Amino acid sequence: MRLFDTDTFREILDSITRNRSRSFLTGFGVFWGVFMLMLLTGGSQGLKEILNNNFEGFAQNTCIIYPGSTTKPYKGFSKGRYWSLEYADVDRIKNLVPEAETVTPTVALWGRSISRDDNSYSGTLKGVRADYANIETPKMMYGRFLNDADIAQERKVCVLGKRVYSSLFPEGGDPCGKRVLVDGTYYSVVGVDWKESGAIQINGSPADMVTVPITQLRKAYNFGNTIHLLCFTAKEGYTMSDLTPRVRQIISRAHYIDPTDEEAMFLLNTQLIFGIVDNLFKGINFLVWLIGLGTLLAGVIGVSNIMMVSVKERTIEIGIRRAIGATPTQILGQIMSESVILTLVAGMLGIVFSVLILAGVELGMTQDGILKAAFQVPFWTAFLAAALLTVLGVMAGLMPASRAMAIKPVDAMRDE
């Protein structure tokens, strides 16, 4: 008897379907294990993509400095003093911290009246330099971002956020070259930033922003040397955690603040945030595989137990096969094939059902024809699961097959 001929497969299917309820319940354990493993894997992949989209375009090695009020007296100054960052702090960090790459200031005004014809919007007016794109990369739908010439010449140009654009230009189309009125001053639109609100927001949501040259904003609102936030990135090979203590010392010394007064000056280290997110999903992936593999292993153990029962029930049949010339290898192949096929069929059904459910989740995550996150199982993960099922199917059939090989024809004939 050959192992992979038509008769062999017919016998395998007949053996599996002989007791359908038992085979179904046995296979369901494997099905559920694979189903949960693939579903959790695809779900965690989609959630990770959603979270990464919230940080999309934001430099991972950024630090944001913003002032608070002092909580400790220092050099004759009492506690509770408010202070402000100044434009000179940009040069201080550049000159004294050579490991810093981009150092750029921002100023912002909230609740500004923004209008065009009969359309209006209340948003945030934000002043930046051209190098701010290295901190928070814009997602340009139309036009361009601010450039160095805009900053140097104090041009009255602006980049609109997504919601601002939708409110002022309900008809759609490219708004570049058209003008909008902000607090009585006309600005020419040079671009539209389509970036959504993210997990990290500097001066507010980018969708509600009208971004203009910082030189123009400082002049129009008499900010002088005051800036609201100071952002900087680290050069490649340096961690932000190495730079922040020195930066705190430099800024504290310039503004007469106790360097140990952490509440007087807040330093938001995004590198730590990204590290926490990465570690979080490493832990989630570990738990997903632990739960999935544990459930799958329990199902495979059930397959092995049922195959043991099947071998016990078929003792006489196996004995007759041995008596008419079936070799131990043929008996081994028969039992192992039943175990592998039962495991594989149940496992592949689990993969298919999980993929279908994840595809339904993807439909719910699609907005305006754009998929926000892919809730699907990677090909190699599914391939690994199929290979694992094969191995586990073989392992599940080893003990029952060994018992079947040990059956002697004479003993089988005496079995009642």
Image: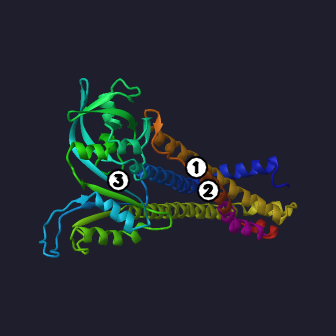
Q: Residues within 10 Å of mark 2 (few under 14, many from 20)?
A: some
Mark 3 and mark 2: Cα distance apart in space: 37 Å
Mark 1 and mark 2: Cα distance apart in space: 9 Å
Q: For the point 57% across and 50% down, which residue is it?
A: 350
Disc 1 target residue: 351
Quadrant including the C terminus? bottom right
Q: Which residues are magenta?
A: 392-407
Question: Is residue 405 one of those drawn in magenta?
Answer: yes
Disc 2 target residue: 385
Q: Residue 200 has which mark?
A: 3
Q: Nearer the viewer, residue 165 or 318?
A: 165
Q: Is residue 83 above or below residue 143?
A: below
Query: SS for tag 3?
Result: loop
Query: SS for tag 1?
Result: helix
Residue 162 position, x and y percent, is 35, 37
Query: SS for tag 2?
Result: helix
Question: Is residue 68 one of those drawn in magenta?
Answer: no
Q: Which three-letter amino acid code belongs to the residue tagged 3?
A: Ile
Mark 1 and mark 3: Cα distance apart in space: 36 Å
Quadrant including the N terminus? bottom right
